[in-house]
Image (cartoon, rainbow, N blue to C red):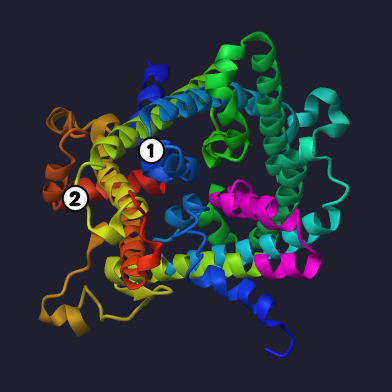
Amino acid sequence: MGLLSKKDSKLIMDPLADNNPITIQVLGICSALAITAQLKPSIVMAISVMFVMGVGNIVISLMRNIIPSKIRIIVQLIVVATLVIIVDQVLKAFAYELSKELSVFIGLIITNCIIMGRFEAFALGNGVWRSFLDGIGNAAGYGVILIIVGFFRELLGSGTLFGFPVLGSPVDKTGLYAIGYENNGFMVLPPMALIVVGIIIWVQRSRNKDLIEEN
Amino acid sequence: MEHLELFFKSVFVDNMVFAYFLGMCSYLAVSKKVSTAVGLGAAVIFVLTVTVPLNWLLDQYILQEGALAWLGPEYADYDLSFLSFILFIATIATMVQLVEIVVEKFSPSLYNSLGIFLPLIAVNCAILGGSLFMQSRDIASFDLALNYGFSSGIGWFLAILAIAAIREKIRYSNVPAPLRGLGITFIITGLMAIGFMSFGGMLTGGGEETTSLEGSGNNVGMQVESNNESTETVEVSTLISE
């Protein structure tokens, strides 16, 4: 980490665990839950958010001294919306199937509270480089949770990872299925995303007692 | 009839919170007390009812492929749908700001109870989600769009009211320490979503299912046990994937 000072690397590492946007700050839950039934859309979503947050934080940070504070929300929304249009068009051009699958949720990156939250809390008051690192760090923390949830839901729900069967074939009864294993079809349904995230929070907070809430 | 069907579909089957997790951030953040939850819920109903029809007009007359035909035949080939995100969010942000100013001017008491939530709403995914779903589902007419906005708002309102009531009660329960607060709220919401899934059969014509599954919102615990019936699960998952 020759490039990054200690303070800077903290900006990136903190959101990955102890200040995770999803499990601690409770930001950006909507998209985290809806698209995690499989691993692939989760990863695409994580990358898209990382792009939007990195670039968005740079832009807002550059403009932070000229944005009138009364209309800053509208300015922020326009910046994010422009970036999301870029992401959406790129996905439509190069990964059409996937963009159909993600449907409105790419558009909903605009209102992803992580992005607005970091703009408000960080990019409006900090320099460009630090804002960029903060954006990347938070997007990474968000992406990690997405990938964990997507991994478990796809593995337990359909027995595949990235669409490849890893536990054997349920039709021919090979692999784990030969000894009577069954896919838990329930995992691919939306409510299980909530419960999986709940369990992640449980595990994280029992490992780090400082994070436990009073009530 | 069409209206009634859309109403029930948006309130129960396609509930913003339980089927699509829209507006989860404010749903989790503002659901500690019933009174504030009611305020935010009312504001969401109001803003959705206003913005969805407005964005429907935008979509029909400006954004869709060929929508600009009313300007003259030479405009008929334009397809501006890639601009929809930015126009929708601009409409929403402006509407929210406008509503805030108007309410502050004419009804200070309403402003005091509702006003603090209005800025929160501009970035609530449920609002933009309402408009985007309206667009992707090709809602056919203006009054259907109005109905869709209103009933989605009602669905969101119901969800936040329910979780706020549960959270007020759960304060007296002995929840394992690491689960307290956020964790248990997630899991309860998950269980409620499982309960709401049973409304899935309501509008697909399954006669017996409809009667047997009514009132399932109340006994979420029982639903968890009976969800092994794969037919139901499959039905719901097809509904969701639509």
Q: Nearer the viewer, residue A6 or B155?
A: A6
Circle 1 is placed at which residue position? B32
Chain ID for label 2?
Answer: B
Q: Nearer the viewer, residue A91 or A124?
A: A124
Toward which corner of the image does residue A206 lie, by quadrant?
A: bottom left
Q: Would you say residue A177 is visible in this rendering? A: yes
The magenta stretch spans which residues? A105-134
Position of residue A187 in the picture relative to residue B63 (left or right) = left
Q: Would you say residue B140 is visible in this rendering? A: no
Tag count in the figure? 2
Residue A123: x %, y % from top left: 73, 57
Residue A140: x %, y % from top left: 57, 70
Name the residue: 71% across, 48% down.
A81
Circle 2 is placed at which residue position? B174
Name the residue: 75% across, 31% down.
B62
Which is nearer the N-term, disc 1 or disc 2?
1
Examine the structure image and report whether residue A124 is included in the region drawn in magenta: yes
Q: Nearer the viewer, residue A37 or A97?
A: A37
Chain ID for label 1?
Answer: B
- Amino acid type at circle 1 is Lys
Residue A155: x %, y % from top left: 32, 72
Q: Which residue ends up furthest to the bottom in the rendered image? A: A2
Residue B13: x %, y % from top left: 34, 35
Name the residue: 47% across, 57% down.
A32
Q: Give how far apart the Cα atoms at labels 1 and 2 are.
A: 17 Å
Position of residue A206 in the picture relative to residue B130 (left or right) = left
In which quadrant is the N terminus of chain B drawn? top left
Q: Which mark is residue A83?
A: none
Q: Does B169 appear above or below B188?
A: above
